[in-house]
Image (cartoon, rainbow, N blue to C red):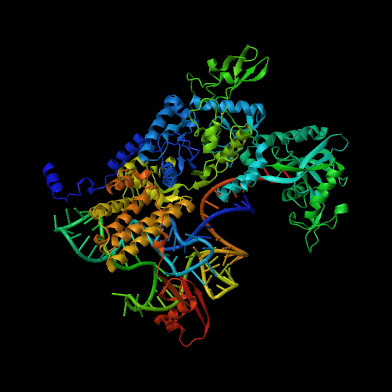
Amino acid sequence: MPVFIFIYKAALPPWRSGMEERYVPAVVERKWQEIWSADHSFRAEENPTRNKFYLLEMFPYPSGRIHMGHVRNYSIGDVVARFKRMQGFNVIHPMGWDAFGMPAENAAIERGIHPAIWTYENIANMKAQLMKMGFSYDWEREIATCDPNYYLWEQLIFLKMLGKGLAYKKRSAVNWCPQCLTVLANEQVEEGCCWRCHSEVEPKELEQWFFKITDYAQELLDETYRMSGWPEPVLIMQRNWIGRSTGCEIDFPVADSAKRIRVFTTRQDTLFGATFMSLAPEHPFALELTVADRRAEVETFIARIRKEDKIKRTSEDYEKEGVFTGAYCVNPVTGQKMPVMLANFVLMEYGTGAVMAVPTHDQRDFEFARKYNLPMTVVIQPPGEELAPETMTAAYTEPGTMVNSGEFNGLDNETAKEKIADYLERRDIGVRKVNFRLRDWGVSRQRYWGTPIPIIYCDACGMVPVPERDLPVILPEDVEFHPEGGSPLAACASFVHTTCPRCGAPARRETDTFDTFVESSWYFLRYACPHYTGGPIDKGAVDYWMPVDQYIGGVEHAVLHLLYSRFYTKVLRDLGLVRVGEPFKNLLTQGMVCKETQKCPRHGWLFPEDVAEGKCRKCGSEAILGRKEKMSKSKKNVVDPDVLIGQYGADTARLFCLFASPPEKDLEWSERGVEGASRFLNRVWRIVYENLHLVSSSSGDLEDPETQAVVRSLRKAIHQTIKKVTEDIENRFQFNTAIAAVMELVNAVSAAPNKERCPRTLGEALEAIVLLLNPFVPHFAEELWSALGHGESVEKSTWPSWDERALVEEQKLVVVQVNGKVRGKILVPTDAADSLVRDIAMADANVTRFVEGREIHKVVVIPNRLVNIVVG
RNA sequence: GCCCGGGUGGCGGAACUGGCAGACGCAAGGGACUUAAAAUCCCUCGCCCGAUAGGGUGUACGGGUUCAAAUCCCGUCCCGGGCACCA
């Protein structure tokens, strides 16, 4: 064998050493990763004289292994980071770990590993995987949110929020996940189920910590109209979630009582048609108003509704039910007595928990009124029609003319809305009011693996915040985990028992921890100053780096993380800690990575490696091919990035993710596609090494016309490609078309005749290819760049700019249509006069065929593009 | 039900402000090289007729605007996502 290699090497021309013959990704990738690391190539340093660019990808939860979603997300980010760096920006590109959370605790219960050990092991594994991908992170800024040096500052921010009334505790009905044994914020409930484990959420009364996000509802909403760098669908989702509606709060006096029932309505124009009142079963007046002989019935009703879970109450076919309290209130504008009902569809959490019912103009009220035989009055008439309560089959909710509404009769209802609001305010019956669907953010979690909430309860002094000097409140390590649940913190005596910082008496610690979304709401600020010990935020550093210029992550966080982060940034701004009010200037939401599922009738979901030739490896049954779905462990339609890297290398993995589809769309996994990406890299490798001897000889291009024609067309291709790739990355994140453009250039170089006569232009082409590919396949590009004779890393070279002169074409190919159908193609001088183009078009043989003998109505000439001859 | 996306060859996807539909890649077929295979290279490739000329037809479906529509407008169907008694 050694003899063979010797002979083989000896047979090679002197400019080839043999090593470069074959592209071996593992060798190339390790080599350059070591060089980048030794050179601190991606270290970011503040420098006010340079333009900064903050590029951020959503940090991962350290589950243990990266998945294809990470590979895609971080490959996209790395393209932008490397591109911006080559463009001369001072790029900060950090990475860290969203390290608190439930899986660590579950591992502790299931496998007896302490969450901290489990988490840090996972971080080490995943970090090694990310490093193997060659992402250009500044690892010196790495953060793990479970590190006391991180959550210390979160506790401090909490104390400051407490001081400003932005954090508070209240007893309320919360969403309880029986599986996770903790509460969830409203945003974390999806279709009545836990966002993480999909168990049904139950209502539960608990004392909970809340953040006053509702104080910022208006600003959070207003800003969405100015955030031009965010995808519109995400902004719409946030607006819907905030759910602003405008209307009036109106007081209805209770008959024979001093009490008043306050309602919120957006339809004060229908006030004259309010014929009964609907209260939520949880409304404080519900029992209070009930007359003695209806009490039993009402109590039964309330008890029954309370027991029903949220799923049932929000399900599609939920029967509208109610009960009469026996009490009446008075319509403040008509003086009419209105029965007070309890209705199961009225929510205590929205508005005031009481609804003025206008059955003629609200569908729910209509159904309810029909069912319980309640009175109806029409107050809005549609144009050209006369509604009567007896004959209506549905509520009328469209615009119309006011009737039965006293002085407002005859107005259109939109005008009446304003007039009635004025009237109510003048008479002190009601006021204009804005209502939001957004609720305060419940942040208490009854879990161990999270940031302790720095509060102490003292029998004498009550609730006492932990003094700043005593921070951090460190998570104790010696706790016990029980499968049946219960917070390990609450059971940890050494943690719970403390002394009151105010009076010194024995006291208890708060044992709830923060929702892990709190950590991810400000980590991007800490990246700017990860080692700062003077406070959570080093203002100088943060003011330099913030805002994030480009944020990249999955759309599944559209309302959760992205709304919380916006809120938190505004809070920190109002605490004087940061200057910006919006954290993320531009947002890119990438699609999911999908793959078809495979199922065995006997063994269920199958991993790709469990299937051989369409059959289950275990039993030989035919594997059923399912539809393409998001890669997930539960459906086993996953591909392990490590296997992929081992087989093809990181650069191929990156290239495939970027080429197969644009970032916003879902990415369909394709083994063939990966092979295609790998084949392309090999092709480029070969074309560079095959021509190296030409390029490295410093001779110029020949001057003969034939060679010059090749030079011109090659240079045109080169500079067109530079332009296209630059614009595709910069303006559209269309990496797939950028890569396609480079492929075309490679094809053009490969097809160019007589390359040996124009080594200079050939060199220009090869260098352009390598430079343009660098953001996508950096190890590969480094290796070829050095092969092309550059001593300096390609990372340090500048992004190529295109030469407009090279793009100039003497002739243009113009399409000739007759009646809109292509009948010929002609070459005309660039920017030729319309009349000339027209004449050349008419002279085309095939065109003549279709024009001859017919009357020409019109000739449309689009310069440099198209001629359309319209004939009769 | 309401609000967003989307529907283009056998497949992933191009076509940026209306101007050659199908770039680029994958798959497939044919050929070259090879004892053979892999790799590589060359050719073909929406569908129908025809010969490789050329013609017809074609961007979910039905209408419309326009010299010209995948692109704009109206209506219908299907797929994906978000919200859903929000008063």
Depth check, front residue: A25 or A757: A757
Q: Is residue A616 visible?
A: no
Depth check, front residue: A14 or A681: A14
Depth check, front residue: B1 or A500: A500
**In x, y percent, where is residue A249?**
78, 42
B9 in relation to A5, above or below: below
**In x, y percent, where is residue A312?**
63, 41
Given the current orientation, which residue lies at the most extreme top position?
A505
**In x, y percent, where is residue A50?**
48, 41
Q: Which quarter of the figure has residue A571?
A: top right
Q: Is residue A553 visible?
A: yes
A173 in relation to A716, above or below: above
Name the quadrant of the N terminus of chain A. top left
**In x, y percent, where is residue A450?**
52, 27
Residue A667 in the figure: left or right of residue A207: left
Residue A13 in the figure: left or right of residue A71: left
Residue B43 in the figure: left or right of residue A42: left
Q: Which quarter of the figure has residue A123?
A: top left
A511 in relation to A59, above or below: above
**Number of dots carrying numbers:** 0
Residue A28 in the figure: left or right of residue A596: left
